[in-house]
Image (cartoon, coloured by chain):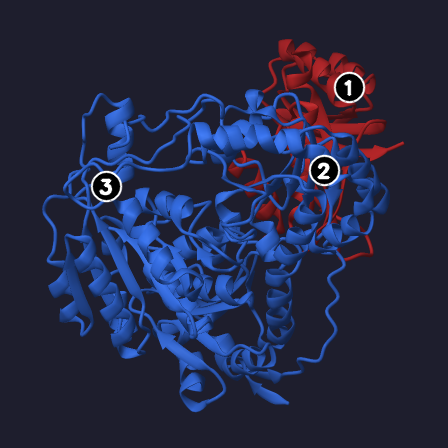
Amino acid sequence: MQISGAQMVIEALIAEGVDTVFGYPGGAIMNVYDEIYKQNSFHHILTRHEQAAVHAAEGYSKASGKVGVALITSGPGFTNAVTGLADAYMDSIPLVVISGQVPMSLIGTDAFQEIDAVGISRSCTKHNYLVTDASDLPRILKEAFYIAASGRPGPVHVDIPKDVTAQIAEFDYSIELNLETYKPHVKGNPRQIKKAMEAIAKAKRPIFYLGGGIVNSNAAYEVRDLVHATGIPAVETFMARGVLSHDDDLLISMLGMHGSYAANMAMSETDLVIGLGARFDDRVTGKLSEFAKNAGVIHVDIDPASISKLVKADFPIVGDVKNVVKEMLESVSLINPTKYEAWRETIRNFEELHPLTYHEDSDRLKPQWVIQRVGELLGDGANISTDVGQHQMWTAQFYPFTRPRQWISSGGLGTMGFGFPAAMGVKVASPDKISINFTGDGSILMNCQELMTAVEKKIPVINIILNNNYLGMVRQWQTLFYNKRHSQTDLSVQPDFVKLAEAFGGIGYRVHTKEEFDAALRDAVEKNIVTFIEVIVERLENVMPMVPAGGSLFNMMLLEKKEKK
Amino acid sequence: MQDESARRVISVIVVNEASVLSRITDLFSGRGYNITSLTVAPIPDSRYSRLTIVTSGSIRVIEQITKQLHKLIPVLKVYEHADLVEKEMALMKFPISENITDIATLCAAYNGKIVNVGDNVFIAMVADEPKRVENLLKIISKYNPKEIVRSGAVALER
């Protein structure tokens, strides 16, 4: 059929099964917004900032496993969205972000709201397109969705000049894609898998190193089967929280800079690292030359460039982790799960020596308690988003995750302001679960305008602000490594968070005690409106344990031991 | 380590489309890899272009470059050459007062000749292995060349 470029955008979104689009209109994208006005096939959620539109699309994608879609205008609309694109790129989140552009005739003339959008997004997207003719649009949009979701997922940006959205051309979405140069490798090499399984059978102290790729490939339940069938203990990366349930006997904990002592020691003492969809990020490995020094490495990843990038793999396996793990399960009888009892005992000893814990030794509430308490009260019933900083690490350490896609956080880019809009996207994708955003007094101000979106669209995100009147994580580093010179991190001057929430039509609570917190959380869940629960917490609490940047995993700063009262 | 600075030649076959060259060069600059020279031209009778990139780095770095290039959507193939025929061209401009016979003889030894003569200057060219071109350019410097332009290397696997 002959339709306009703008209509093609709508038709393509419908054909892709999109039910929600996050966005913000503006001059160059108006033709598309005019078509959105006329249609009833999907919801459009107007965020109050383009960055928030992309983060919401990320949250939606992470919770649902589907491609997230955001729609923005040219110039500042696009540049505001760049942080979201970069965030999605670092965390391999499939997005299609469509931006308006000035008309073709004005490109290159420094026109109003013109910016070289594809030039900017090139280094922070999996792929991008500038559409110069509406007849290319069906193919480009179809490719965009396919590229975003396949292989190692990532954001794809499509920039459409205003005249192209007005241009009439033939629309046929049933075209076959012919991407001769893009063929993701999804099936692992069977011989390599067999060799890897033999290596596991021979190992004395093997360890599963589980990464976020498992969540992306929807392989968590296959991985659980593999872990249980082999009896081999597992550590999770920050991105992999929820792959194993928190109460799984074989789950040690998170590893890395703020990983548990046991997880980091196990990683240091292992003789075989079985990496599944993890990328040996610097926050995980610490000092590379000391990382799992005496161990062989099996590395399963869909991205060949991730393999042997930082740690040399002895058994590289390129493939979708779900396929590979399924194939591993077929020869799992090679492995005798009783064989690792001594190794598991060693790890239990590490856990007993320095358990992941904190001291309740101050008048003010401890932030860790708040997170644990939410876990006790809501547990599996909540999806957990966070912003970035201390609260984020404490949530990763202390929340009792039970399932994949329960945990939504900005890992690679570490984007303050991610949490609230992401939690909105999570709620839209998963309305039956309570959507919590753990945040800090620093982060929440970086997208607090989204209160308006949440009120208008009735998206009842519960924002739990762990308020220590500091940019806590930077303050912690200043305390530890800059001789307590707390440069520009004291946030003693703050808005009234209760009134702030109320000003937009949400609900605010300020709590100082455990009783007040329980009451506020219960009320927030009942009221089912967007809320800020401001929790006044201990100001100088540090995230422990900690591997200082560039240090070795086995050289951790530990929580001071205290006599039990 | 001698390995660290080793010179490598990589050929990349890409879809000949808008901004594909920026994708390649952005990848090099974004990830901190070196480009010594880069040439690009369409492959006859196809929708592809061929880039020849001369770079340097350890085996590990080159492996990463190769993999990262492969990840770019419009990249069809990446070869890191081991056994190859490699050629580079150079054009040199001299004042007319310089010894044209000497220069022509020298250039002839490097598959070259005088290609243009004007009132005040003449231009010579050579086409040879990059190392030999380098060598010639050293020698030729005593004839006071006003300008020199090198094409960058192109290469084919044997």
Compute the Cα span from label 1 to label 3: 67 Å
Q: Are marks 1 and 3 on the same chain?
A: no
* Quarter residue A115 falls in: bottom left
Q: Quadrant of the N terminus of chain A?
A: bottom right
Q: Nearer the viewer, residue A20 or A284?
A: A284
Q: How packed is label 1: few (under 14 Cα within 10 Å), some, or many (20 or more)?
A: many
Q: Are marks 2 and 3 on the same chain?
A: yes
Q: Which residue is mark 3?
A: A471
At which x and y percent is residue B156? 83, 35
Q: Residue furthest front?
A: A565
Which residue type does callout 2 highlight? Thr
Q: Nearer the viewer, mark 1 or mark 2?
A: 2
Residue at x 63%, y 71% (from the top left corner): A142
Q: Which residue is mark 2?
A: A338
Q: How packed is label 3: few (under 14 Cα within 10 Å), some, or many (20 or more)?
A: many
Q: Nearer the viewer, residue A516 or A180?
A: A516
Which residue type does callout 3 highlight? Leu
Secondary structure of the residue carrying numbered label 1: helix
Compute the Cα span from label 1 to label 2: 76 Å
Chain B: drawing colour: red
Does A146 sit left or right of B76 as displayed?
left
Rendered view: A468 above or below B9: below
* Chain ID at mark 3: A
First in sequence, mark 2 or 3: give its number.
Answer: 2
At which x and y percent is residue A323? 74, 55
Q: Are marks 1 and 2 on the same chain?
A: no
Rendered view: A241 above or below B7: below
Letter of the blue chain: A
Q: Which residue is mark 1?
A: B107
Residue A336, visible in the rendered structure: yes
Does A458 sit left or right of A498 as displayed?
right
Q: Nearer the viewer, residue B132 or A175?
A: A175
